[in-house]
Amino acid sequence: MKNTRLCLLLALALTAAAGSTTVRAQASAAVAAADGVRITVVGEITAVDVAARTVSIKGPSGNIGDYAVDPAVRNLEQVKVGDRVQIDYRAAVGLALVKGGDGIREKVEGDSTATSKDGAKPGGAVLKTTTIVANVLSVDKKRKLVKLQGPEGRVVDVQVRDAKVLKEVKVNDQVVAKVTESVAINVKPAAAK
């Protein structure tokens, strides 16, 4: 779990350098839909302080950031100046309409991690899934808006682009959204000169 912090910190820092991307969900005629995004960013290690457990990474735009490396990250001594850090970030959203749901809103989260083997370059992956069940409070077909109430009581208006899906949605139905995010970090040796 501690590797999650480093992975997410590095991913956020380097993806911010690459620009922002929005994950959106689109409804379809099947009353179920999915959409997602994948971002890959490569940076270069410019400094390593094993004793202080910090690294400096130059992003694709030339910006350099300093990062604390969590003690749970193995094999930091294997990282050298010039090594390449590749970060793959993926996010996907799946939606389904549940007709006449039971009215119980919920949010369920789960995660898993993988780390590098002893003696190998540091690396790892984190997978996080979140399933949210929201109640349909109202449907405005003219404005193509559905008002949803989530598990913590928050109410949001959702724009529905597909008219066929909008025809299917009724008050007291439920929408199930499954969000899957993964971040993988891989350190590769510097190219031979």
Image: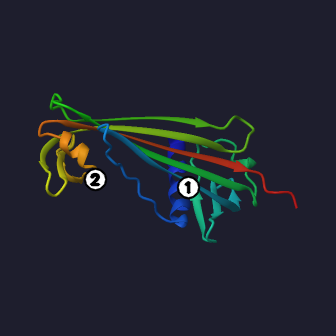
Where, quadrant-wise, is the C terminus in this rendering? Answer: bottom right
In terms of depth relative to the viewer, which is nearer, 116 or 154?
154
Element type where label 1 sits in the image: helix
- Where residue 90 appears, as percent x and y from the top left, is 51, 47
In terms of depth relative to the viewer, which is nearer, 144 or 41?
144
The reply to whether residue 21 is visible in this rendering is yes
In terms of depth relative to the viewer, which is nearer, 49 or 81?
81
Q: Residue at x 58, y 59 (%)?
A: 67
User: Marks 2 and 1, Cα distance to the nearest angstrom?
Assistant: 34 Å
* Three-letter amino acid code of the residue under disc 1: Leu
Q: Which mark is residue 110?
A: none
Q: Which mark is residue 161?
A: 2
Question: What residue would you read off at disc 1?
Answer: 10
Residue 58 falls in which quadrant of the image? bottom right
**Earlier along the polypeptide chain: callout 2 or callout 1?**
1
Q: Residue at x 43, y 44 (%)?
A: 92
- Where residue 137 appears, as percent x and y from the top left, is 12, 44
Say few, some or many: other residues with alpha carbon within 10 Å of mark 1 (under 14 / 14 to 19 / 20 or more).
many
Disc 2 and disc 1 in contact, CB within 8 angstroms: no
Element type where label 2 sits in the image: loop
Q: Is residue 183 left or right of residue 42?
A: left
Q: Residue at x 32, y 37 (%)?
A: 30
Residue 184 falls in which quadrant of the image? top right
For residue 101, above or below residue 156? above
Q: Is residue 170 left or right of residue 75?
A: left
Q: Residue furthest bottom?
A: 62
* Three-letter amino acid code of the residue under disc 2: Arg
Q: Residue furthest top?
A: 102
The reply to whether residue 177 is visible in this rendering is no
Which of the two marks, 2 or 1, is nearer to us in this view? 2
- Where residue 5 appears, as percent x and y from the top left, is 50, 48
